[in-house]
Amino acid sequence: MVGRTEEKRQLQSLLSEKESQFIAVYGRRRVGKTFLIRESFDYKFTFQHTGLSTNSIKKNLRKKVQLEEFAKSLSETGCAPKNELTSWYDAFDCLKEVIINSKDKKKVIFIDELSWMDTKGGELLSALEHFWNGWVTARKEKDVVLIVCASATYWMMDNIVNSKGGLHNRLTGKINLRPFTLAECEEYLKTKKILFNRHQIIQCYMILGGVPYYWSLLKKGKSLPQNIDELFFKDGAPLQDEYNNLYHALFNKPEQYIKIIEALCDINKGITRDEICKKTRISSSGELTKKLKELENCGFVRKYVPFGSERKNAMYQLVDNFTLFYNRFLKNNSHDENFWKSASNSSEIYSWSGIAFERVCLEHIEQIKNALGISGVQTDVNSWKCEANPDKGLQGSQIDLLIVRKDQIINLCEMKYSESDYVPDVAFDKAMRRKISDLKKTTKTKYAIHSTLVTTYEVGESSYTGNIQSIITGEDLFK
């Protein structure tokens, strides 16, 4: 298994704990949660069950269907229910019998896609609370390891991780499984014997993000453009419908979530809550707050407060590479099946490349900090902009990445995607000086401001290169 060393260690350590354990594993769809859990326990469970997606099932039948599927999983353990399950209390009573009858030293119970089992009026959470609080923790034998998992991160956060009900503070552990880093993607490609250089891996990450399932679809012996055409643009391509499937799997009513995402796609730096309301015509309410938080929890959206600003001026920015790619190139797809191979040098792709590379950098802040030698320094990561105002001596600037450090230094990062070594010119130098000047005048900061260049290849020598305080290359993003 590639990566996931700490997560695997955490899961396997549950077997040596003296008390019963209740752990939640969550993260976006296709990130490898189920694979991690199965690999960590060598596919050996006292009981395992996966909730059934019920989007295509009539609402009045959803609870019944979920209970029927749970009964089938019980039967596979040799403890078939004597009667039809009519409630989740019945279902967990049967699970108690499985645990009592098991000869396993540790009774490892794995319930996957728990959120899909939570049908309206089904009382799943109440029954789960009763099972854990009223039975598992009350047993003399402290031998149960209960692992629950779901792709609906917002549901897991609201109902399990941050539960205000009977499961409040009941978890003994949690794992938020993040997408692969560039280094992990490189390691994964090696296991598949796919030969891409590091620049090509960065390009691939700009499209797929770090979602392991998407990378598993790449084929050896084919170039990156060939792979992308086959994944997205050919008839019946495996990822053509993934966008809709992704949001429909996560949200019961995904239309408004998709509206918010599409509004964010249009503005690279992000937009405010009020601007989201105007663009989507969704009213400002507690429901909008909930949807924005859910998108943030799922890793699609980043909320940040611009440097020197107040929390009420928070910005929302799309950070999911796959979503950005889909909306740029597949939402209104009129491209032929060889689009990516033939259009690699087009202005459309050039414009997208700069934005997508910025997203890659935002996913690798720790690697950037390591390259700067400040991995142990407390930092705030945000962005900043100001409008031109000649009366105040402001020329107008936008800074997409600021690393504000407790050692009184600000790294003003300029992220430049390049197909070769980047050579700073007079325009780059002038823009950097303008941004530093505007930042100082507007925020009145006393911190030293270090111009920092993050680019894909090396940096060539010019009369302006020496003005850059710190240089981060694509190689650094893999460390």
Image: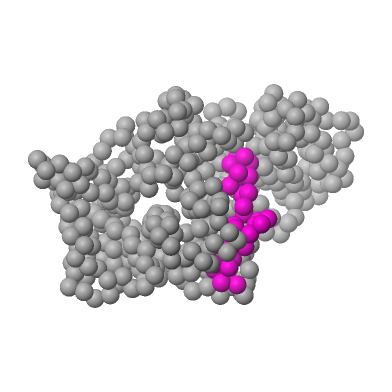
Q: Is residue 150 magenta?
A: no
At 51% from the left edge and 66% from the top edge, which residue is drawn?
A: 342
Left or right, 214 with reference to 365: right
Quarter of the picture containing the N terminus is bottom right
Residue 89 visible in the picture: no
Residue at the image point whose x is 21% and y is 58% from the top = 432
Q: Position of residue 398 (x, y in %)?
A: 26, 49
Q: Is residue 192 left or right of residue 466?
A: right
361 or 15: nearer the viewer: 361
**Magenta-tinted stretch:** 222-250
- In the rendered view, would you say 214 is above or below 152? below
Residue 339: quadrant of the picture? bottom right
Front-lying residue, 367 or 416: 416
| Residue 252 shows up from this direction | yes
- The percent position of residue 164, horizontal first and vertical second, equals 54, 28
Q: Main secondary structure of the magenta part?
A: helix
Q: Is 284 left, or right, of 309 in this rendering? A: right
User: Horizontal and vertical percent for residue 318?
Assistant: 44, 45
